[in-house]
Image (tube, grey):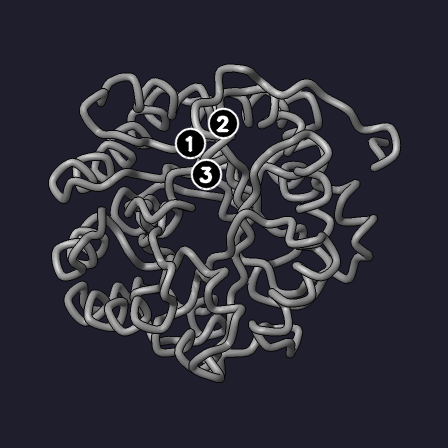
């Protein structure tokens, strides 16, 4: 088993933006939307375990992914902004991979292949600059529930293999999404720093603005920063409607707000439990979502990355950037 003590790898020299991520310097960046819900409800794709990475091993799947990412590159082009593209690997970690019959060797291969695909997207669109490639990491557990309890060391060992795969590719950073407690985030940050990978951490909140573990967003960010010497390059919030995120804001001048550079919100105002049980897609209203995003931009002074999560597609992200004047 890979452990924090013996885990080593060599970072790829072909990554473009590892030394200086443009989103850290005020460059507006369009992110993509809710990949899995888009595929399931709009393209009738079966995704066991909500895992989209097996599509990389299927010709039709690769075509769907190419078309999906091209939509968001086109949005970035129209609005004169950059783009952050996330690999479809949110479930490509050991325990979730096993549920779709992918072992360690296959997961390493598919994580690398996911980056290769986005490199090809970037090369086909040289007029859109910058396009940052992010190796997407998901939680060990459900993503909606605080159902997996790990120490930071256990989390570091668990996520290290996927981060190792990304570090040997042209990926510019790794981003961990839909985290519900600080310990897992701490472990991910430590694993990324061992291999000199920039890292972003994204927590999700419930309708009351709290993480599923009961922690406030402010406490989660402050805890991770304290335990990693400010290790994350930045934070995001994802998989919650902006009105739910607004409940997490607290004091107007809270320093932690300056660390949040990205929001990838749900279109639906439903709770995670309600979404989990829904048989039909609640894709909300793109214009309403855009208006709610505008309020979050005022709340998070350094916000540069905007995209969607569950229930969103290119229509929602287009609306966000159409109503959200860009900077720089």
Closer to the eye: label 3 or 1: 1
Question: Which residue is under mark 3?
Answer: 52
Which element carries disc 1, helix, strand or loop?
strand
Are discs 2 and 3 less than 8 Å apart at CB?
A: no
Above or below — where is 45 with respect to 203?
above
Closer to the eye: label 2 or 3: 2
Is 9 placed left or right of 315 in the picture? right
Q: Residue at x 27, y 36 (%)?
A: 68
Are discs 2 and 1 less than 8 Å apart at CB?
A: yes
Above or below — where is 239 with respect to 9?
below
In percent of width and height, residue 289 lies at: 23, 68
Judging depth in this view, the residue of 129 and 214 nearest the camera is 129
Q: Residue at x 51, y 40 (%)?
A: 136
Disc marking residue 171: 2
Query: In terms of image quadrants, where is residue 1?
Result: top right
Disc marking residue 299: none
């Amino acid at each position: 088993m890979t452990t924090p003590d013996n885990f080593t790898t060599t970072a790829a020299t072909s990554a473009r933006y590892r030394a200086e991520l443009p989103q850290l310097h005020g460059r507006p960046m369009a992110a993509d939307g809710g990949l899995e819900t888009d595929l399931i409800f709009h393209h009738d794709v079966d995704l066991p375990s909500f895992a989209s990475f097996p599509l990389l091993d299927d010709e039709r799947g690769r075509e769907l992914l190419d078309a999906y990412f091209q939509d968001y590159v086109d949005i970035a082009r129209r609005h004169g902004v950059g783009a952050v593209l996330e690999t479809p690997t949110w479930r490509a970690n050991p325990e979730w991979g096993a549920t779709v019959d992918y072992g360690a060797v296959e997961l390493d291969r598919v994580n690398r292949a996911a980056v290769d695909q986005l490199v090809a997207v970037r090369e086909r669109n040289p007029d859109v600059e910058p396009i940052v490639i992010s190796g997407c990491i998901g939680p060990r557990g459900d993503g909606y529930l605080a159902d997996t309890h790990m120490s930071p060391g256990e989390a570091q060992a668990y996520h290290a293999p996927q981060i190792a795969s990304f570090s040997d590719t042209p990926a510019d950073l790794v981003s961990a999404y839909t985290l519900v407690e600080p310990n897992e985030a701490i472990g991910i940050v430590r694993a990324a720093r061992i291999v000199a990978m920039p890292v972003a951490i994204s927590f999700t909140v419930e309708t009351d603005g709290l993480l599923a573990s009961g922690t406030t967003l402010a406490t989660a960010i402050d805890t991770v920063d304290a335990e990693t010497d400010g290790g994350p390059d930045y934070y995001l919030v994802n998989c919650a409607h902006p009105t739910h995120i607004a409940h997490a804001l607290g004091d107007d001048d809270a320093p932690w707000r300056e660390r949040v550079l990205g929001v990838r919100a749900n279109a639906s105002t439903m709770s995670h439990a309600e979404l989990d049980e829904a048989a039909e897609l609640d894709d909300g209203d793109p214009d309403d979502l855009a208006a709610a995003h505008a309020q979050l931009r005022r709340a998070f002074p350094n916000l540069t990355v905007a995209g969607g999560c569950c229930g969103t597609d290119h229509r929602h992200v287009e609306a966000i950037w159409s109503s959200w004047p860009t900077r720089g």
